[in-house]
């Protein structure tokens, strides 16, 4: 399933929406637009882990921590289910997501347990 771009009749893929989301997220005031783009990407491809991660960052930037935590938890769940083939990338995204969750819940990244006790 694809959606149409506003300025062309070319269908946008999940990756197109995700790329647009990252561009919007990089611009300081466009987090709501980024959220929409990331959600469109996820609707088209529910296993697109980078779109979930971008969505979590956008929600965090908009001071919506509970929603961001839920999205970062989804990133961890997807990683644990084997969505990411590259073990190094998988470990990095998992640690970053847990770090964001810890920071929103407790004020710091607190990754000691994750770094020293988790085997990837």
Image (cartoon, rainbow, N blue to C red):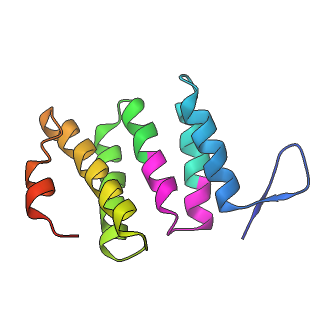
Q: Residue sitting at 61 percent across and 34 percent down?
A: 24
- Considering the whole magenta stretch, tell me its main secondary structure: helix
Is residue 57 found left or right of 9 in the rendered image? Answer: left
Q: Residue sitting at 30 percent across and 61 percent down?
A: 91
| Residue 41, x across and y down, in percent | 60, 57
Q: Residue furthest front?
A: 88
Q: In which quarter of the image is the N terminus?
A: bottom right
Residue 43: within the magenta?
yes
**Nearer to the camera, 106 or 91:** 91
Relative to 118, residue 51 above or below: above
The magenta segment: 40-55
Residue 47: within the magenta?
yes
Relative to 24, residue 50 above or below: below
| Residue 82, x across and y down, in percent | 37, 77
Q: Which residue lies furthest to the top in this view?
A: 29
Q: Residue sitting at 61 percent across and 51 percent down?
A: 18
Q: Residue furthest right?
A: 9
Relative to 59, residue 27 above or below: above
Is residue 113 found left or right of 88 in the rendered image? Answer: left
Res 74 visible: no
**Nearer to the camera, 84 or 72:** 84
Relative to 22, residue 115 above or below: below
Dividing the picture into quadrants, the one containing residue 64 is top left
Q: In which quarter of the image is the C terminus?
A: bottom left
Is residue 109 found left or right of 47 in the rendered image? Answer: left
Dividing the picture into quadrants, the one containing residue 29 is top right
Q: Residue sitting at 60 percent across and 43 percent down?
A: 21
């Amino acid at each position: 399933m694809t959606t149409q771009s506003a300025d062309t009749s070319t269908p946008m893929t999940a990756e197109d929406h995700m790329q647009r989301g990252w561009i919007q997220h990089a611009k300081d005031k466009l987090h709501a637009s980024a959220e929409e783009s990331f959600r469109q990407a996820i609707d088209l491809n529910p296993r697109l882990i980078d779109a979930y991660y971008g969505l979590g960052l956008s929600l965090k930037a908009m001071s919506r921590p509970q929603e961001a935590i839920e999205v970062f938890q989804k990133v961890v769940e997807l990683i644990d289910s084997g969505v990411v083939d590259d073990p190094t990338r998988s470990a990095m995204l998992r640690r970053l997501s847990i770090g964001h969750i810890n920071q929103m819940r407790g004020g710091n990244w607190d990754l000691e347990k994750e770094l020293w006790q988790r085997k990837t």
